[in-house]
Image (cartoon, helix red, strand yellow):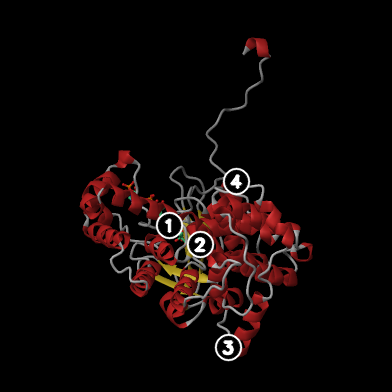
Amino acid sequence: MKLADNKATLSFSNGSPSVDLPIYQGSIGPDVIDIRKLYAQTGMFTYDPGFLSTAATQSAITYIDGDKGELLYRGYPIEQLATQCDFLETCHLLLYGELPNEQAKKTFTRTVTIHTMVNEQMQFFLRGFRRDAHPMAIMTGLVGALSAFYHDSTDINNPEHREIAAIRLIAKMPTLVAMAYKYSAGQPYMYPKNALSYSGNFLHMMFATPCEDYKVSPVLERALDRIFILHADHEQNASTSTVRLCGSSGTNPFAAIAAGVACLWGPAHGGANEACLNMLEDIQRMGGVAKVGEFMNQVKDKNSGVRLMGFGHRVYKNYDPRAKLMQETCKEVLGELGLENDPLFKLAMALEKIALEDDYFVQRKLYPNVDFYSGIVQRAIGIPVSLFTAIFALARTVGWIAQLNEMIGDPEYKIGRPRQLFTGSLRRDVKPLAER
Ligand code: SDX
């Protein structure tokens, strides 16, 4: 970042001395006012719950232009990556800053492939869960438990440890998600098959059984790989900020990623794809497209507490480019599977059309986000609704790790420790029990 020739001057109407604050510029996007010395100079904090106007860090990984609906991973538009690259090339890009050449791609793919197995002891953690446990409850436990197996890569300040931990997490997440699924289905776990692609191997571990061979469908393999690319990273979203704050204490990468998994689970964040599909199924049960108007009235009624899940975004005030690509993937997969008339897809398209013409949504700049169509395509692939957010966590692990490693590699980083505006009781003395 570089110092701008502009500066901010903070003046106070009560005559307190004004304060000059430096402004810094990045390579693209909004400048920042550096308030690091504000408390020392004024005795006051800034106030920004939800971080609507706060840049918590500088980063060179992902750029979002919410007004244009633009998403770049290390400068490359998501539309080009999703159609011209595969997920492991995207992982290489996010982790190391460049797309791999032929040789680098072979080496990186091989390195990830040979780390896809988990320690045999990991299977015993699942036995403690009920078979109907939510997969994200299982994933929060399993990812955190990984730190018990890799004492050789938990020193976050050691670049080699950071590198091998990144590879292990990217490689093992599909195996753990597939294990969570098999456990819920009461089926035996399937070991990874190194001859398969990253996404093909995940489909194998999910849907193969020891009883017969499983043939990976190239269409589903490609669709899943694109879903992983679209979910790989997204600037300083809630779960990434959680991973950064958790990692800033110096804890090991497995624990920090487990914190990200827990945060992603929320319906306002990664849990929205599951919530969106459940919403579509509810409307379908109520009567489908004929009931969309009634449902939209509920959404627009503040007291109903009903939201159009998969719509709206803190940053995008235009169409989420990932939603467009997800809709295209939806059409391709449904077409390949002969499900063009999938009622939920038609219902989603009807909802989107109505919302984009409705003043309530237009005024608030609410558009479909990445979660609006992702559930429909995952359901078509055969993935159960409850596993959608675990798939999101699988894909986002590379973004979390890249952002965590960027933070730890930044000599300026400190442990994150926000302050507050205190509105509670002033000092008072404890009364003896008999007098309370
Ligand atoms: C993800 O940050 C990221 O990058 C996240 C993510 C990533 O890749 O990491 O992109 C992934 O989490 C996508 C978002 C998934 N969540 C949902 O689809 C859940 C539904 N959407 C929302 O709850 C909401 O839009 C958020 C949480 C996504 C954004 O919330 P904000 O920015 O805090 O906006 P807000 O709640 O203040 O809403 C602004 C207005 C409000 O109305 P008013 O009070 O101004 O009258 O818009 C309304 C809200 O009521 N609104 C909605 C709505 N989303 C916002 N009304 C109906 N349906 C919705 N979905």
Q: Are marks 4 and 3 in contact (CB under 8 Å)?
A: no
Q: Residues within 10 Å of mark 3 (few under 14, many from 20)?
A: few
Tell me the kind of residue under disc 3. Answer: Asn
Q: Residue furthest front?
A: 211
Distance, label 4 to label 1, CA atoms, is 23 Å
Q: Is residue 384 visible?
A: yes
Of labels 1 and 3, the one closer to you: 1
Q: Which residue is mark 2?
A: 392
Of labels 4 and 1, the one closer to you: 4
Tell me the kind of residue under disc 1. Answer: Asn
Tell me the kind of residue under disc 4. Answer: Arg
Tell me the kind of residue under disc 2. Answer: Phe
Distance, label 4 to label 2, CA atoms, is 22 Å
The image's mark for residue 400 is none
Q: Are marks 3 and 2 in contact (CB under 8 Å)?
A: no
In what quadrant of the picture does the N terminus appear? bottom right
Q: Is mark 2 within 8 Å of ligand 1?
A: yes
Q: Which residue is mark 1?
A: 273
Labels 4 and 1: the sequence-earlier one? 4
The image's mark for residue 130 is 4
Q: Is mark 1 within 8 Å of ligand 1?
A: yes
Q: Which residue is mark 3?
A: 101
Of labels 3 and 2, the one closer to you: 2
